[in-house]
Structures are given as C-alpha cells and as structure tokens.
Image (tube, rainbow, N blue to C red):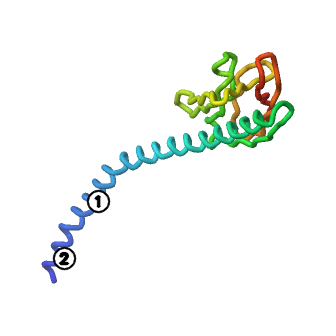
C-alpha cells in the first residue's frame, strides 16, 4: 500500500505538467483555427448578401423600367459593409463587400450588364441592417438600377 502512494506522489505532478504542456501547445493552433473560421464565415455571409442584391437587381432589369424590389440586407458585424456601385463605369456595374482589415471584394455584373445609379453617382456603403429599394430606370445609357436607402 505504501509503494502505490509513493508512485502516485511522483506520478501525479508529472501528469499535471504534461497536461498543462499539451494545453499550452494546442491553444495557439486552436485560436488561429477559430479566427480563420470567423473570416471564412463572414465572407460567406457577405457573399450571400451580395447574391441577394444581385438577384433582385436582375429581376428588376428583366421586368423593365418602373419595376422595383425592396431588399433587406444584414451585415454579420459592424465592421463589415456592403458596397454598391461607384463613380466609374466599371464600378457602377459592381457589387461587393468589405470585411475589417481586408481588401474589398467586388463582383462585376456583366451578363447581362447591370449598372447601379444613385442620386449623386457615388458608391453606396451599407453597414448593419438596412432596407434598400432597387428600381429599374431608363437613362441616357439605357437601363440601370437606381438604389435608394
């Protein structure tokens, strides 16, 4: 009986040391995996919002001038934003998103060509939850989708 107690006295601190060492070595790896998962998850959610607006814009263009759709977009976090249109011709035909600390990701709508216009032809950046109205208009360059917040 005495012999088993001595083994436990010597073995238990060694086991605790090994468990602590394993936890310390695994924590950075698990933390990096979690951060990467959050980035991928945020990108997937934002791409879903871009697809939702793209689908609504396509429906509006197919139905012709005067038709409109109301779309509710929601960002997964406050540091994320949805980007619609822009001043240049190529940017006016794009949708995209911006995640914190990353470069903007844009999708150019070229088949068919869908242009987004606003009252001042500026880029619209949407944060948080927002309801937007997409309306098909006919301007000097042909059909376009007017975006209103």
Secondary-structure class at tag 1: helix
Q: Residue at x 77, y 29 (%)?
A: 145
Using the image, determine if residue 126 lies above or below residue 86. Answer: below
Left-right relation of 121 to 23: right
Left-right relation of 147 to 92: right
Q: Residues within 10 Å of mark 1 (few under 14, many from 20)?
A: few
Quadrant (top left, top right, bottom left, bottom right) of the C terminus = top right
Quadrant (top left, top right, bottom left, bottom right) of the N terminus = bottom left
Q: Residue at x 82, y 27 (%)?
A: 137
Seen from the viewer's position, the closer of residues 93 and 3 is 93
Left-right relation of 39 to 134: left
Mark 2, residue position: 5
Seen from the viewer's position, the closer of residues 149 and 15 is 149
CB-based contact (under 8 Å), mark 2 and mark 1 = no
Left-right relation of 124 to 138: left
Seen from the viewer's position, the closer of residues 50 and 141 is 141
Mark 2 or 1, nearer chain start: 2
> In x, y percent, where is residue 49?
65, 41
> In x, y percent, where is residue 122?
73, 20
Mark 1, residue position: 19
Query: Number of numbered discs present?
Result: 2
Q: Residue at x 80, y 41 (%)?
A: 70
Q: Residue furthest right?
A: 66
- Identify the image quadrant of residue 128: top right
Secondary-structure class at tag 2: helix
- Identify the image quadrant of residue 28: top left
């Amino acid at each position: 009986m005495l012999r088993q107690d001595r083994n436990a006295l010597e073995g238990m601190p060694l086991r605790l040391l090994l468990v602590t060492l394993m936890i310390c070595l695994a924590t950075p790896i698990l933390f990096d995996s979690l951060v990467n998962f959050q980035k991928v998850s945020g990108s997937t959610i934002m791409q879903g919002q871009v697809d939702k607006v793209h689908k609504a814009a396509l429906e509006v263009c197919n139905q012709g001038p005067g038709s409109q759709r109301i779309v509710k977009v929601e960002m997964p976090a406050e540091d994320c934003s949805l980007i619609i249109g822009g001043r240049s011709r190529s940017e006016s035909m794009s949708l995209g998103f911006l995640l914190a600390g990353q470069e903007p990701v844009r999708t150019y709508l070229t088949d068919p060509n869908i242009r987004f216009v606003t009252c001042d032809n500026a880029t619209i950046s949407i944060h948080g939850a927002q309801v937007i109205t997409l309306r098909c208009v006919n301007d000097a360059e042909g059909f376009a989708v007017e975006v209103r917040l």
